[in-house]
Amino acid sequence: MEVIDLRSDTVTKPTEEMRQAMYRAEVGDDVYRDDPTVNRLEELAAREMGKEAALFVASGTMANQVAVMAHTKRGDEIILGEKSHIYVNEVGGIAYLAGVQAALVTETEGVMDARVVEQKIRQENIHYPNTSLICVENTHNMAGGRVVPLAAMKEIHDVGKRHGIPVHLDGARIYNAAAYLGVEAKEIAKYCDSVNVCLSKGLCAPVGSVLAGSREFIERARKFRKMLGGGMRQAGILAAAGIVAIEKMSKRLKEDHENALLLAKGLNSLEGVSVDVGRVQTNLIMVDFAGTGLNGMQVAERLKQNGILINGSSSPVVRFAVHYYITPDDVKRTVEVVSKIIKN
Ligand code: TLP
């Protein structure tokens, strides 16, 4: 029995085309900027995001952390969502690495209200830290893959511009947002000053993210990447897969979104299981098992015994992540198995 892995889109292994590209990749020492494949990936990513330059880094976390370090000074304050990945899931890096503190905004469906963001900006006062960055996440992971609308992105960017504060976009899944909105990724990225794009989630690359922004910002980020030990040498082996991720895999994400909707509808049809189908926009779905009397850990354990993996949680709400390797048949089997495990 094949395992159906719905824990995350990060579990995606490189495609055959990626493995071929990795095998053939021309490489050099990227700390000397001698790796032609890394250079090609960075140029491609900069173009795709409509920015001057880009930097290949080891992970989404590294892209976000290096961005916060490059935008801020120690003791500053940054504004971000209370459910954002940067705040919740990056091991307190903003405090430890950048030495900044957080001003949190409660998101609604993953979206921060621009007026609230503006209220959080510190005025000049001897007692206050400087506000030096606003972070947005699109799609929003903990909101269940929700897309931040372009109008909301623009409003926040306008607030930033009015106050001279840059906006960083955690666009780990920006291509999912672009696929949902039916626009090019740069139409989203134009409302930020820097953007993290993950290659190793739904796009299937084995490793890496690209951080894009102005040439001057990327040069500062490059130095912080080196400080964190992220100056890789013959990284073209990895960048080669990243090029396939952007050129090819970013174009097919609608399929994942269709399968996610199919899964949401199937699960929602089961007694005691509830998914707000109307809220499903991309590849992540939040499933509430409260009506079954099971918590997320119990659901995960029972599914595992039947060859299906999800990340458990102490609450009855769990995330199912759909990706390239999840077929409509897998969706069907998942619904059948869930139907079985909630009955006994
Ligand atoms: N998200 C992972 C976990 O860390 C939760 C997942 O399984 O979804 N930004 C966003 C919005 C993310 O969802 C993630 C990873 C990252 C940044 C960090 O990327 P990596 O894992 O490459 O450091």
Image (cartoon, grey):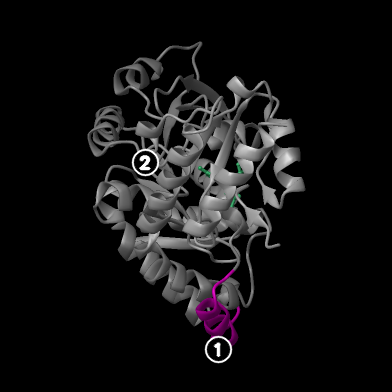
- Locate the C terminus and report the quarter of the image it occupies: top right
Q: Which residues are drawn in magenta? A: 14-29
- Asked where in the image residue 114 lies, by quadrant, the reply is top left
- Asked where in the image residue 330 lies, by quadrant, the reply is bottom right
| Looking at the image, residue 114 lies above or below residue 284 | above
Q: Nearer the viewer, mark 1 or mark 2?
A: 2
Q: Earlier in the sequence, mark 1 or mark 2?
A: 1
* Amino acid residing under circle 1: Arg
Q: Is residue 23 magenta?
A: yes
Mark 2 crowd level (few <14, some 14–19, many ≥20, 10 Å Cα): many
Q: In this view of the protein, can residue 123 be seen by the observer?
A: no
Residue at 31 percent of width and 48 percent of height: 180
* Amino acid residing under circle 2: Gln
Residue 82 rendering spot, x and y as whole percentages: 52, 24
Q: Is residue 110 left or right of residue 61?
A: left
- Locate the N terminus and report the quarter of the image it occupies: bottom right
Residue at 39 percent of width and 48 percent of height: 194
Q: In this view of the protein, can residue 42 be seen by the observer?
A: yes
Q: Is residue 136 magenta?
A: no
Q: Nearer the viewer, residue 246 or 79?
A: 246
The residue identified by callout 1 is: 24
Residue 126 rendering spot, x and y as whole percentages: 48, 12
The residue identified by callout 2 is: 281
The answer for how far apart the CA atoms under marks 1 and 2 are is 37 Å
Q: Nearer the viewer, residue 62 or 9?
A: 9
Q: Nearer the viewer, residue 96 or 275?
A: 275
